[in-house]
Image (spheres, grey):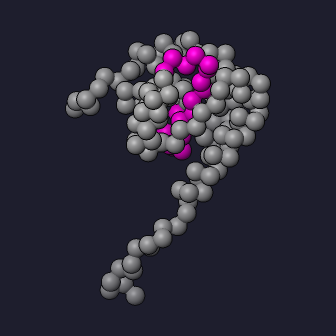
């Protein structure tokens, strides 16, 4: 099956091996389901892009950006839209936020995860009708 793009697996491996200090610090808090029992992968491919930290079950992408992230705001916005169209929510933190206040960053991630769980567990506004003939 041709997906129309090449999956950036090699790039993902390289990025995992060369994580920034801020990414490493946040990973210490996210690895092994330490935040809300949610599993995250590092440098995970989503289509043609690679998310810094991705929870497939929670459909959450966490990006850690430096001052010289290397992409223009327009390209970054296009990347975010692409990922969001695949059903993920994207949240971003600056390197200095992670390095100076990792507990606050983790608290915000926990808040977003609980918000996401609440939305997922919300009952449908249009419940299915009862099956006919089964009284």
User: Between 62 and 82, which is closer to the camera in this rendering?
Assistant: 82
Name which residue lies at 59% across and 24% down: 65
Tell me where residue 92 appears, x and y as whole percent: 60, 33
- Residue 127 shows in this picture: yes
Tell me where residue 72 appears, x and y as whole percent: 48, 23
Residue 23 position by quadrant: top right
User: Between 80 and 87, which is closer to the camera in this rendering?
Assistant: 80
Name which residue lies at 47% across and 16% down: 13
Question: In the picture shown, does residue 78 fall above or below 8?
Answer: below
Q: Give the side of residue 95 with respect to residue 78, left or right.
A: right
Name which residue lies at 32% across and 83% down: 132
Tell me where residue 115 appears, x and y as whole percent: 62, 52
Please check the rendered image and state whether residue 118 is part of the magenta-colored stretch, yes or no.
no
Question: In the picture shown, does residue 15 fall above or below 43?
Answer: above
Name which residue lies at 36% across and 84% down: 134
- Per the rendered image, the range of residues in magenta is 54-71
| On-image quarter of the N terminus | top left
Please check the rendered image and state whether residue 70 is part of the magenta-colored stretch, yes or no.
yes
Tell me where residue 28 appears, x and y as whole percent: 69, 25
């Amino acid at each position: 099956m041709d997906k129309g793009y090449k999956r950036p697996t090699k790039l993902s491996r390289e990025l995992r091996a060369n994580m920034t200090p801020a990414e490493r610090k946040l990973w210490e808090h996210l690895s092994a389901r330490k935040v809300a029992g949610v599993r995250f992968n590092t440098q995970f491919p989503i289509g043609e892009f690679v998310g810094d930290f991705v929870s497939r079950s929670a459909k959450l992408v966490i990006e850690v950006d430096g001052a010289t992230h290397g992409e223009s705001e327009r390209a970054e916005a296009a990347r975010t839209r692409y990922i969001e169209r695949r059903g993920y929510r994207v949240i971003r933190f600056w390197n200095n936020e992670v390095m100076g206040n990792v507990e606050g960053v983790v608290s915000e991630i926990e808040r977003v995860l609980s918000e996401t769980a609440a939305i997922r567990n919300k009952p449908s506004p249009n419940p299915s009708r009862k099956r006919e003939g089964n009284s």
